[in-house]
Image (cartoon, helix red, strand yellow):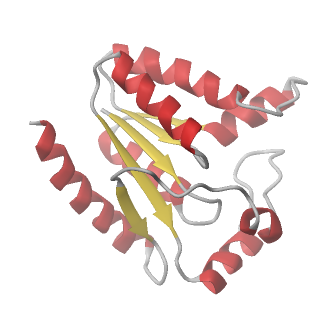
Amino acid sequence: MLYIFGGLPGTGKSTLSAALARELRATYLRVDVVEQAMRDVGMRIDGPEGYIVCHAIASQNLRLGLDVIADTVNPIQITRQAWRKVAESLKTPYLEIEVVCSDESEHKHRVETRIADIPGFVQPTWEQVRYRQYDVWDRDHIVIDTANQTVTESMMALCKRLDRERKKFG
């Protein structure tokens, strides 16, 4: 199964996707890690390069029969479609999960106070997050709102929704 996460920085997306990867013992792909590694070796990242690398790694792991968790902002329709194509090309089921924080002041606080957990990675500012292009999702997907919830509560909500959705795949 491919679990496709999306959501603006500071919503709790990486926290939840990493927790799910630990629980499932799944391959975890975080585009921020890939892009920072590319920068560390002198590459300039100004397009989809990190996503393309993650797609290739996801495909390889799905071919091995492993679940894959994709942790990316996934801000526009084309990036979401590209992830679906990874799964569809392998006839692998997938679930799309959008993580949101509906409380703007809480979201802003998270963005402004979080500490980078990737060496050398520069966190986006609140203004960059607030004005980032982020298309409305065009299809059914799981939405987890982390506002005013603990990580444990958000994870419980996610697992409950995933259990319900996975039953559809048999």
Q: Does residue 43 sit above or below 122 in this rendering?
A: above
Q: Position of residue 148 (x, y in %)?
A: 47, 84
> What residue is shown at x 49% (from left), y 79% (from top)?
147
Q: Position of residue 24 (x, y in %)?
A: 31, 41
Query: In which quarter of the view is residue 103 placed?
Result: bottom right
Side (left or right) of 36 relative to 83: right
Residue 105 versus residue 27: which sits nearer the camera? 105
Side (left or right) of 11 relative to 81: right
Side (left or right) of 42 relative to 126: right
> What residue is shown at x 24% (from left), y 59% (from top)?
161
Marker count (numbered): 0
Return the residue found at the far left.
170
Q: Does residue 34 sit above or below 76 in this rendering?
A: above
Q: Does residue 83 sit above or below 22 in this rendering?
A: above
- Is the C terminus in the top left, top right, bottom left or bottom right quadrant? top left
Return the residue found at the far front.
138
> What residue is shown at x 79% (from left), y 57% (from top)?
123
Residue 40 versus residue 87: which sits nearer the camera? 87
Q: Position of residue 95 (x, y in %)?
A: 33, 43
Residue 140 versus residue 169: which sits nearer the camera? 140
> What residue is shown at x 78% (from left), y 45% (from top)?
119
Side (left or right) of 16 relative to 92: right
Query: In which quarter of the view is residue 128 placed?
Result: bottom right
Q: Position of residue 15 (x, y in %)?
A: 51, 58
